[in-house]
Image (spheres, helix red, strand yellow):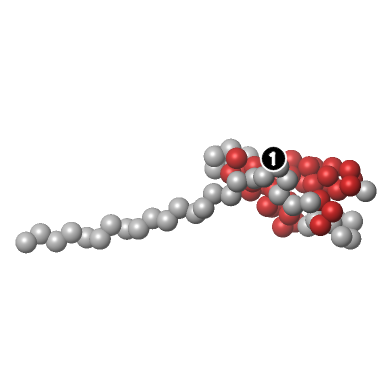
């Protein structure tokens, strides 16, 4: 009788789809500074939207930071 090894289970992380605006910019900066975790979240959304293609991490970070700063300024 042949025995078969169990297949390794793979779990795919749920994809995070960006809505029109993930969070209101006003909640991102209560003391006049954009939090790094908010920049990281926005940068990840860009990575996700690109289909998880690597090699653009710095550009995503800079773009995310720029967008959040602009949103914050627009709300003031």
Q: Residue furthest right?
A: 76
Q: Visible in this render: residue 43?
A: yes
Count of numbered marks: 1
Residue positioned most to the left = 1
Seen at 35% across and 58% down, the residue is: 9
What residue is rendered at 25% in x and 60% in y? 6
Looking at the image, residue 76 sits to the left or right of residue 26; the answer is right
From the top left corner, tell me how far across and down residue 12 is, in percent.
Answer: 45, 53
Q: Indicate the quadrant where residue 4 lies.
A: bottom left
Please rate how many residues cluster around mark 1, counting C-alpha atoms within 10 Å: few if below 14, some from 14 to 19, many from 20. Answer: few
The quadrant in which residue 11 appears is bottom left
Q: Position of residue 67 (x, y in %)?
A: 78, 42
On the image, the x and y values in percent for residue 28 come to 80, 56
Horizontal placement of 51 versus 23: left or right? left
Residue at image location 60% in from the left, 40% down from the top: 49
| Vertical placement of residue 53 versus 13, above or below | above
Q: Which residue is mark 1?
A: 59
Would residue 47 appear left or right of 23 to someone viewing this image?
A: left
- For the N terminus, give its image quadrant: bottom left
Identify the residue at horizontal 28%, vertical 57% (top origin): 7
Badge 1 marks a residue whose secondary structure is: helix
């Amino acid at each position: 009788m042949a025995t078969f090894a169990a297949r390794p289970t793979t779990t795919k992380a749920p994809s995070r789809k960006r809505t029109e605006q993930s969070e209101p910019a006003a909640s991102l900066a209560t003391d006049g500074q954009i939090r790094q975790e908010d920049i990281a979240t926005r940068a990840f959304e860009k990575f996700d939207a690109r289909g998880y293609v690597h090699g653009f991490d710095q550009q995503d970070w800079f773009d995310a930071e720029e967008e959040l700063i602009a949103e914050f300024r627009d709300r003031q």
